[in-house]
Image (cartoon, rainbow, N blue to C red):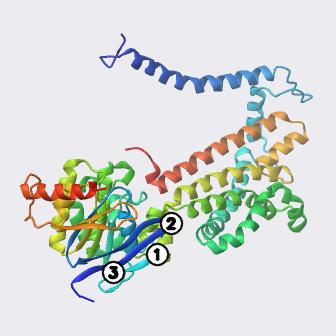
Amino acid sequence: MSEEYKVKVEHLTKYFGDLHVLDDVSFNIKKGEFLCVVGPTGCGKTTFLNLLTRIYMPTKGELYIDGERADPKKHNLSVVFQEPSAMPWLTVEKNLRFGMEIKKLAKDEIDRRVLNMIKLLGLEQFRDRYPHQLSMSTAQRIIIGRAFAMQPDLLLMDEPYGQMDIKLRFYLEDEVIRLWKEMGTTVVFITHNIEEAVYLAERVLILTNKPAKIREEVNVDIPRPRKVSDPEFVKIRNHVTEQIRWW
Amino acid sequence: MSKKHGLNLSKAEIMEHRLEILYRILPLISVLLLVGLWMIASRDFNADVGSGFPTPAAVWDRTVRLFTRPVKKMNLIMHALVSLRRIGLALAFDWTFGIIFGIIIGWFPKPRAFFTPMFDAFRAVPPLAWIPLITLWFGIGEFPKILIVIFGSLASIVVNVKAGLSAVDKMYLNVGTVFNATPMQTLIKIAIPSSLDAIFAGVRTSTSAAWMVVLAAEMLGADSGVGFLISRGMDSIDMPLVLTGMIAIGIVGAILAILTQFVERLICPWTRKSK
């Protein structure tokens, strides 16, 4: 098995009862790659992610991380879920600490990373607030901070910016790019926003309708920072849009 | 147009303002009406033969007399404290054993499958039905009374804790899975905190259940406690004493409710919905 690949997906198939969600999907993700997965709503993007984290088990096929069968016990991975998943009983700061405390990191290391995240995400004034006291987008920032603070080598993001206002989304898109470059994390970013996918990804994976197969892989070789008005950007965006509208 | 804070209010705002005032007045009217009804109902009260419904004044006098001439050397507050001590001991058991048991049958599927039928059978029996057996086994001391209170209040905490633990949001458990939490971490750092409001609902209902059952237990055989005051009043056709006891029960019950609510806010600050 090649060392170059962070994730190998082989003949991945998933049924929920009679519902066929993923159909024989195979692809690889390179180490340190930023991959976006796009596809129509309800096509099985989230299912794919939940298979990687072993929240679900595949019906057929297998997922490998670093050449081993995917297992959150062995691999340092983090997930940003689509739904607001901040613990309502913890303050912002304690939510940021949560994952690291589960993994029993040293206290001063946790302090350092949390402080960094609070600064990075502009959460200073919310430190001691509870999630229900915050707006949707602020609550989602906690989740992003919680995931990045883990310094995962595989970060899975499931439409993390879906709930956010546009300004903050642009800001956090740049932020995720910055963190990705800094940490060398492999990122799988699921979205239904095509512009977002082309803006972020090195490679865009387009899925078909359910049962999902890979429609096409599109390499995005545009230098960063990317401009949404750049003709090359527009060309790729239109191409991806066409592929999704194809059926 | 009326003026308030120097602003012109629209018709709708004036209506809203008036409604707010009305909502504040209505509870007062309710209390006054109750006292009024009480006075009307007690018109025919005769203290000497104990006929009719006691007047507010007679109840007040009786309450004062309870302090100047205590019953069984105890005034009203001491009787209330005796009752509170009984439920305190019972609740101490409920809140330790009951919560642990609730967590076990709420969280672990095998104990749940095993204990649920047993527990459902137990809680289907009204606590007062245990009185003959408990009296036979343990006599009429302090312990059997506390035991009856436990039997009457344990179920409500166990049921609430169990409900909370068996309905932890999958989302939070998934977060635990992803961060590779151990089963123990999942229980202690996710499941129990996320059920704290359900656990507190159990604390509240068990407190009020315990308070009801202790009075019943005391009425059936005790020489102290608020329930005893009521049965003493009944035996000696001293209706003002009965009313004194009833009102004391209401006041203590309300204080307990406020107290548990206060503690809940202290321990679960995130359940407060304020900004």
Q: Nearer the viewer, residue A202 or B262?
A: A202
Q: Disc 2 vs disc 1: which is toward the camera?
A: 1
* Residue at left offset 19%, top offset 65%: A201
Identify the mark at residue B191; answer none if there is no mark.
2
Crowding at dot 1, Cα within 10 Å, few <14 / some 14-19 / many 20+, comes out as some
Give the residue at mark 3.
A75
- SS type, badge 3: loop
Badges 1 and 3, same chain: yes
- SS type, badge 1: loop
Q: Position of residue A142 (x, y in %)?
A: 31, 59
**Is residue A104 something that shows in the picture?**
no
* Residue at left offset 18%, top offset 58%: A239
Q: Nearer the viewer, residue B145 or B65?
A: B145
Alpha-carbon distance for marks 2 and 3? 24 Å
Q: Position of residue A60 (x, y in %)?
A: 44, 78
Identify the mark at residue A59; answer none if there is no mark.
1
**Is residue B198 something that shows in the picture?**
yes
Q: Which amino acid type corresponds to the residue marked 1 in the rendered image?
A: Thr
Q: Disc 1 vs disc 3: which is toward the camera?
A: 1
Placement of B219 over or under B147, stated as above or below: above
In which quarter of the view is residue B255 placed?
Answer: top right
A21 on left or right of A243: right
Q: Which amino acid type corresponds to the residue marked 2 in the rendered image?
A: Ala
Alpha-carbon distance for marks 2 and 1? 29 Å
* Residue at left offset 85%, top offset 24%: B45
B22 on left or right of A238: right
Chain under disc 2: B
- SS type, badge 2: helix
Q: How many marks?
A: 3
Q: Which amino acid type corresponds to the residue marked 3 in the rendered image?
A: His
In which quarter of the view is residue B121 placed?
Answer: bottom right
* Residue at left offset 73%, top offset 41%: B67
